Amino acid sequence: MTKTSKRKTKKKEISQPAEESNGNLDLIPKEPPKLAPQGIRTFTVCRQQDTTGVSGDGVIIEGVLLGTGQCIVHWLFPPPRGGVAIFDSMEDFLKVHVLPHPENETIITYQDARQEVFGGRRGGPMGE
């Protein structure tokens, strides 16, 4: 004859979020910490010409400036996917891909329609 033992386990109470009358959860986001970065900005990079012949002219990059200051760029060449690169800052991206090639007459357009123009007749970064 075998004995079966019954273990007693304590049930943990799990607090449930409040529900609205329609059954959806009423989720309320917490306030961000005071030191948290705020938001992202998107932009495109358009070259009037490509003297190297590598990535072409027109809109060649779509990018994101993170709230931390980091810059993510998505090269649209070669199609269909291109490549992705992450820079510590927008300035680092500019030093590598824009400022050394003023003859390309590069225009960076941000989501708020602000533009920065590099090279060409204007000679350097414009707009603020």
Image (cartoon, grey):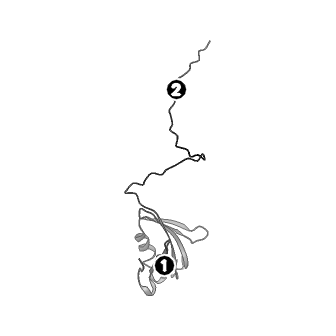
Asked if labels 2 and 1 touch by Cβ distance under 8 angstroms, the answer is no
Q: Quadrant of residue 127?
A: bottom left
Farthest-out residue, top: 1
Three-letter amino acid code at the position of disc 2: Thr
Residue 65: percent from left, percent from top? 46, 66
Front-lying residue, 9 or 60: 9
Three-letter amino acid code at the position of disc 1: Ile
Q: Residue at x 43, y 85 (%)?
A: 122
Front-lying residue, 49 or 15: 15
Farthest-out residue, left: 35
Q: Earlier in the sequence, mark 1 or mark 2?
A: 2
Q: Quadrant of residue 92?
A: bottom left
**Residue 107: mark in rendering:** 1
**Residue 9: mark in rendering:** 2
Front-lying residue, 24 or 74: 24
Residue 25: percent from left, percent from top? 56, 47
Answer whether residue 55 is visible to the viewer in this image.
no
Quarter of the image containing the C terminus?
bottom left
Q: Secondary structure at mark 1?
A: strand
C-alpha separation, residue under disc 1 versus residue under disc 2: 67 Å
